[in-house]
Amino acid sequence: MAESNSDSNSQIGTVRVKRGLADMLRGGVIMDVVTPDEAKIAEDAGAVAVMALERVPADIRRDGGVARMSDPSMIEAIQQTVTIPVMAKARIGHFAEAQVLESLGVDYVDESEVLTPADEAHHIDKWAFTVPFVCGATNLGEALRRISEGACMIRSKGEAGTGNIVEAVRHLRSILGDIRKLTQADEAELFDWAKQLQAPLGLVQEVAETGALPVPMFCAGGIATPADVSLVMQLGAEAVFVGSGIFKSEDPAPRAKAIVEATTHYRDPAMVAKVSRGLGEAMPGLEIGTLETKLAERGW
Amino acid sequence: MPEDLVAIDGIILPGGESTTISMLLESSGTFEPLSELLSHGLPAFGTCAGMILLSNEVLDGRNDQRSFDRIDIAVRRNAFGRQIASFEKQIDVRGLAEPFQAVFIRSPGVESVGPEVEVLATIELDKEIEIPVLCRQNNILVSSFHPELTDDLRLHQMFLSEL
């Protein structure tokens, strides 16, 4: 089949095309993988996409040092192994890493706080790219700032690499709670909301009218069990990113499968119970109070 | 779930990841009962992944990927390339007066169609090759693009008129 579409009325990289892939991932699980073998396990378990990276957040946290974009050969090896979409992470503000990832043909770029930020004031101008971006957010203002920069998917940040769901819940509740409040605000109050949220008025008005972000909102950071997935999906997440929670657990393949099943059947406690049986040890968790670095605080 | 299939008049299989959908249909015990209904004439509209699931031949699929074999087309997954090659364009559809804005996301491509299949829309690749993107066989309608990503309901109406 022909490689490219030569027709002149055909457009790539439109907002609809970029947000469209995020729409297609709704209800699914995106899994962090560090090798082609892990990518295969993720695809076999029913992941809708994989995030290719060199170290999962739990290891980044343990090892310290500067965390950067992955080696292109590793990303390519994963692209060759699976047929589902492959995402990869760039550092916050590091548009050159994002350009490299786009040239590799990754399907989504995650401008991620899990890596060491490259710019302490500016995020990447994501409108300048054909590849779509996902960005993390801890609150509604941050989510809308990322969308104003061109993000086509938002994920609540949680606290990556901890196996502790508490921060993900805090961020989801903050974002969705403020959306609910916005829908109750009158026109005059929206100006103040925009100021408080430090977000563009137009986006604030749009959210107030529709009662939802203009892009899909997924959940990340701290998911370790099928019940964790059910919790965040019931709170309003539309899909989940699972990082260390799968491949830092005792037996990754069955856990990966169980997390996929729980994401599909999140409203059915009997089903969540069924898939939760006999999974072995979950990843060891960390108390948020004991952390030296809170990754969620990166990003502005 | 199988109990959700009771008394339905038709089914829409929307976009998503076909390998995942196929796996979950299997593990929830929905594949067999749905396959049974489809073989007894349940109308279906499949878009993108849904097209793959209704086709009789899947190319570049996973070995364990199953399809319902309800429309005589061979479909290649991700035939247009990765996300950066995903596109939208206006297409002409047989039976619709005005063009349709079609959104293609890592779309499957139809490589061959059987004699029973009506091709309702095509796109031209490299000036030479016409690729079918909307096909119908009896009451099975499939598109390689996503009408669910626009507000244009004409294809949904076309499907509903068959019920």
Image (cartoon, coloured by chain):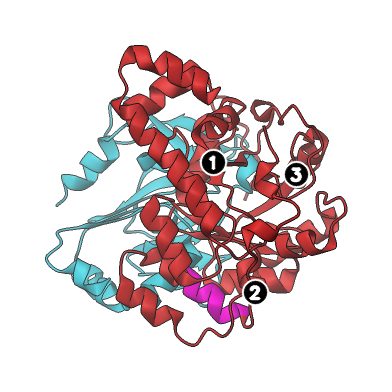
**Looking at the picture, how far across and down is residue A39, in whole percent?**
67, 68
Residue A267, compared with residue A40, is above or below; it is above
Q: Residues within 10 Å of mark 2 (few under 14, many from 20)?
A: some
User: Which residue is label 3 attached to?
Assistant: A90
- Residue B31 appears anywhere in the view: no
Provide the residue span drawn in magenta: A252-259
Magenta highlight: main SS: helix
Q: Residues within 10 Å of mark 3 (few under 14, many from 20)?
A: many
Mark closer to the observer (2, 1): 2
Q: Position of residue A57 (x, y in %)?
A: 72, 60
Single out the mark in the foreground, 3 or 2.
2
- Disc 3: host chain: A
Seen from the viewer's position, the closer of residues A80 and A109 is A109
Name the N-terminal-most of marks 2 and 1: 1
Q: Which residue is mark 1?
A: A153
- Quick one: A19 or B131, which is closer to the camera? A19
Where residue A156 appears, as percent x and y from the top left, is 54, 46
Q: Are both tags, 3 and 2, on one chain?
A: yes
